[in-house]
Amino acid sequence: MKNLTLVIALAALSAVALGQVHAAPKKGVQRATIVVDHGFNPANLSLKAGRPVQLTFDVKHRDCASSVVFEGMKLSKPLTNGKKTIVSFTPKKAGTIAYGCPMKMMKGSLTVK
């Protein structure tokens, strides 16, 4: 019995060392921070469809971005210099979600897979 336990333990360690064991993907909320400072940084993010999203817009200098508008989603949130604004939603299907300022001078996108 000792030998069997040792063999199983060594096999598991070998698999980990060879990169054959992968952690299960988390099913929780997808979180990201986007810094607003004369633009959106990062301007592009990748997300998974069907999982909740929480974006934190950390506003340093908003320029014309009095709000962030998500095209095609009927979703908009006001932005204020020196404050953080949280936007939460769940993307239902794959595709690209464009977002930006109301004047469309500052832009970003979310790629949903």
Image: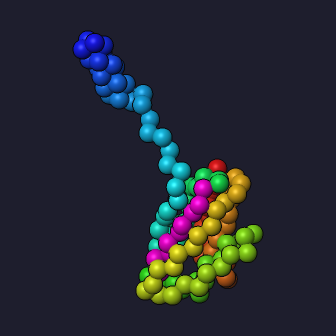
Q: How is the image coloured?
A: rainbow
Tell me where residue 52 sits by quadrant. bottom right
Identify the residue shown where x is 65% and y is 54%: 50
Tell me where residue 102 sits by quadrant. bottom right
47 in relation to 98, above or below = above
Whether residue 18 is visible: no
- Is residue 54 or residue 44 the one in the foreground? 54
Name the side, left or right, on which 9 lies relative to 83. left
Whether residue 106 is visible: yes
**Residue 76 colored in magenta in the image:** no
* Region in magenta: 51-59
Main SS, magenta region, reads strand
Identify the residue shown where x is 57% and y is 63%: 53
27 in relation to 109, above or below = above
Residue located farthest toward the left when viewing the structure as drawn: 2
Give residue 99's position: percent from left, percent from top.
64, 71
**Residue 52 colored in magenta in the image:** yes
